[in-house]
Image (cartoon, rainbow, N blue to C red):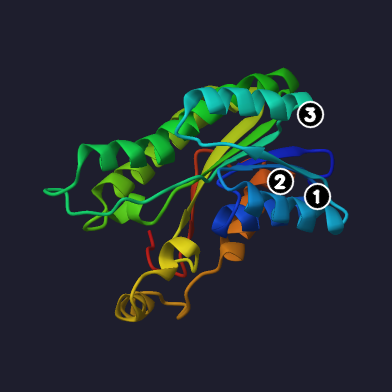
Amino acid sequence: MSLSGRVVLVTGASQGIGRACALKLAETGAAVAVAARNQDKLSELVSQVTSAGGKAAAFALDVAEEEQIKSTIKKVIEQFGKIDILVNNAGITRDQLVMRMKRADWDAVLNTNLTSAYLCTQQVMGSMLKQRWGRIINVTSIFGQTGQAGQANYAASKAGLIGLTMAIAREVASRNITCNAVAPGFIETAMTSGLGDDFKQNALKMIPLGRIGTPEDVANAVAFLASEEASYITGHVMNVNGGMLMG
């Protein structure tokens, strides 16, 4: 799979799945614009890509801020000339049982995980429509498909991403733009590293493949959906969960 000549924007790229996606997409030949709040980690990522012969640039972005999204995407297009592929990966958790969940925690998760994907997609659409080619890939979650106690806000945001994916896929298909989602299961990232060993062991028992996933497992799926090889796939949710959820 070659993405030579393509420009990718990855949100939440400073660590975990976003970072792995940026590295994988750069490896396949794309120029990568990486965006997140942590500038130090982004700088390290850009250095890693460029030292391997790739092309990358870092952009400071808090996706919870609409004006930052608009200005950042404008800067990316000014620097690279276009955006061919958007990976909406940025996400947070604010876990609590729904009866105790504060409205601020609901709003923060929905704004960061779902509203930002709508805003980013809206801002890159002009570039994709102009060239009649585009790939939009939303990183959702198995918990957007199954629900999860203590994560009503997170599950709602990720389920919303699935609906958003399908709606956008229908809107832009005639312009040769696809929109798909990747739904990771239990992946070893900074977000899951704080979970207790008991929780991890119980989760492992639910995974038929018998191992916890890696960010690279998700990045490989994202790279495929971004490629020409996936040109006839749109409105699809690709499960990357080791068999934890089937059907």
Reading the image, the residue beneath label 2 is 227
Where residue 76 appears, x then y in whole percent?
71, 30
Position above or below: 148 against 195 = above
**Mark 3: which amino acid?**
Gln
Reading the image, the residue beneath label 1 is 2
Where residue 90 appears, x then y in whole percent?
50, 45
The quadrant holding residue 178 is: top right
Tell whether label 2 touches label 3 (CB within 8 Å). no
Q: Is residue 237 left or right of residue 53?
A: left
Q: Nearer the viewer, mark 3 or mark 2?
A: 3
Tell me which residue sits at (42%, 77%) in the image: 208
Q: Secondary structure at mark 2?
A: loop
Where residue 200 appears, x then y in whole percent?
36, 76
Tag 3: Cα neighbours inside 10 Å, few (<14), some, or many (≥20)? few
Residue 79, label in figure? 3
Position above or below: 84 against 143 = above
**Mark 2: which amino acid?**
Ser
Tell whether label 2 touches label 1 (CB within 8 Å). yes
Position above or below: 20 against 43 = below
Task: Count the labels in the image.
Answer: 3
Tell me which residue sits at (47%, 74%) in the image: 212
Judge whether residue 99 can be spotted in this image.
yes
**Mark 1: which amino acid?**
Ser
Q: Secondary structure at mark 3?
A: helix
Mark with earlier residue (3, 2): 3
